[in-house]
Image: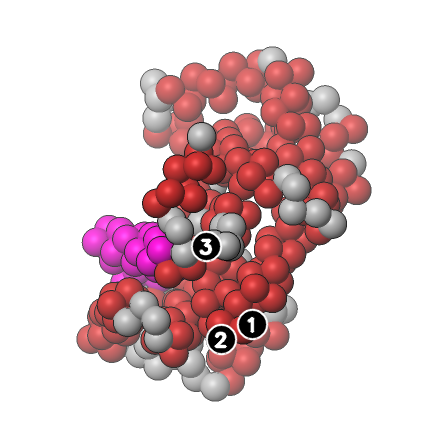
């Protein structure tokens, strides 16, 4: 039923592109309206680069320093970022407008992680989802396949390292993770629904362990996406389920960015 709805209302690649760009624009507007965007770009004492060469390259080229050099410059950069996606939506057939928006988004992602003080996955889904729209029509299918493969590899290896590092061997491992992850939340929101559920899971480690195993198996299942398109719809559903569970149980706010990658699995070429 869902696939039929998508086929009816999203009949071609332009409809999907509008959806992807609009979703990113709305998400960025939320960051801007909440004040987080200005904080990520300018109003933060941190500038963390870690061991990632990409971040050091941005630093050497001063691409991360210019937008954060002052309040006015940061505000101007955030405004240009929003307008670039609005322009890409208006000029939906112009891939150069999308490329410019994507480059500015990448700069924001570097600033986002650098100012936050550690690398996060909030915007990675946006980058994966935008990749196919950077290429000409004759390369679109290949670039879509590449983005889909990268998506499957990212989820599979996330599950693989959970398996490899052996957290599943301890029945109490997820209970300990929940205790650490939600310590501040449980202190400030002792009567919250999430607090009640987390406390229950901590007190019943077997149930928490089953949630952990289900998340690991959802991720490991993406290995099949590397060899066949037969499970595309299921993989899209798994992306949604994993991040809803990740958001609610782990309080990790990557829901907006990562679930956008579902379109890589749901898109079907219009044969008409």
Q: Is residue 10 above or below residue 3?
A: below
Does the segment drawn in magenta span residue 100?
A: no
- Mark in the foreground, 3 or 1: 3
Horizontal side of residue 41 vs 169, given as left or right: left
Q: Quadrant of the N terminus?
A: top left
Q: Secondary structure at mark 3?
A: loop
Per the image, the residue denoted by label 1 is 139
Contact between marks 2 and 1 (CB within 8 A): the answer is yes
Sooner in the amino-acid sequence: mark 3 or mark 2: 2
Badge 3: few (under 14), some or many (20 or more) residues near its Cα, within 10 Å? few
Sooner in the amino-acid sequence: mark 3 or mark 1: 1
- The prevailing secondary structure element of the residues shown in magenta is helix
Q: Position of residue 140 (x, y in %)?
A: 53, 67
Per the image, the residue denoted by label 3 is 272
Q: Quadrant of residue 255?
A: top left
Stretch of the chain drawn in magenta: 15-40
- For marks 2 and 1, give the CA distance: 5 Å
Residue at left offset 35%, top offset 29%: 188
- Mark in the foreground, 3 or 2: 3
Q: Secondary structure at mark 2?
A: loop
Q: Is residue 194 visible?
A: yes
Per the image, the residue denoted by label 2 is 136
Q: Quadrant of residue 39?
A: bottom left
- For marks 3 and 2, give the CA distance: 20 Å
Q: Position of residue 85 (x, y in %)?
A: 30, 66
- For marks 3 and 1, give the CA distance: 20 Å
The outermost residue toward the bottom is 61
Residue 103 vs residue 193, the one in the foreground: 103
Residue at left offset 54%, top offset 73%: 138
Residue at left offset 55%, top offset 18%: 201
């Amino acid at each position: 039923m869902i696939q039929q709805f998508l086929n009816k209302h999203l009949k071609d690649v332009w409809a999907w592109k509008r959806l992807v760009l609009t979703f990113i624009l709305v998400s960025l507007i939320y960051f801007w309206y909440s004040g987080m965007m200005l904080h990520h770009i300018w109003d933060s004492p941190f500038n963390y680069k870690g061991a990632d060469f990409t971040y050091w390259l941005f630093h050497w080229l001063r691409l991360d320093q210019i937008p954060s050099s002052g309040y006015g410059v940061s505000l101007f950069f955030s405004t240009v970022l929003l307008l670039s996606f609005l322009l890409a939506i208006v000029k939906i057939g112009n891939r150069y407008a999308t490329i410019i928006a994507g480059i500015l988004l990448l700069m924001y992602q570097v600033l986002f992680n650098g100012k936050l003080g550690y690398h996060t996955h909030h915007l990675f889904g946006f980058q994966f989802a935008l990749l196919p729209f950077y290429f000409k029509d004759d390369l679109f299918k290949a670039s879509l396949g590449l983005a889909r493969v990268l998506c499957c590899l990212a989820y599979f290896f996330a599950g693989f390292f959970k398996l490899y590092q052996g957290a599943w061997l301890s029945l109490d491992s997820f209970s300990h993770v929940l205790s650490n992850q939600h310590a501040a939340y449980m202190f400030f929101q002792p009567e919250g629904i999430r607090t009640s559920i987390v406390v229950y899971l901590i007190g019943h480690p077997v149930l928490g362990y089953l949630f952990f195993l289900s998340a690991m198996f959802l991720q490991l299942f993406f290995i099949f996406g590397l060899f066949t398109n037969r499970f595309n719809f299921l993989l899209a559903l798994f992306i949604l389920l994993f991040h809803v569970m990740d958001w609610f149980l782990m309080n990790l706010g990557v829901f907006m960015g990562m679930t956008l990658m579902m379109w890589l699995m749901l898109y079907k070429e219009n044969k008409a």
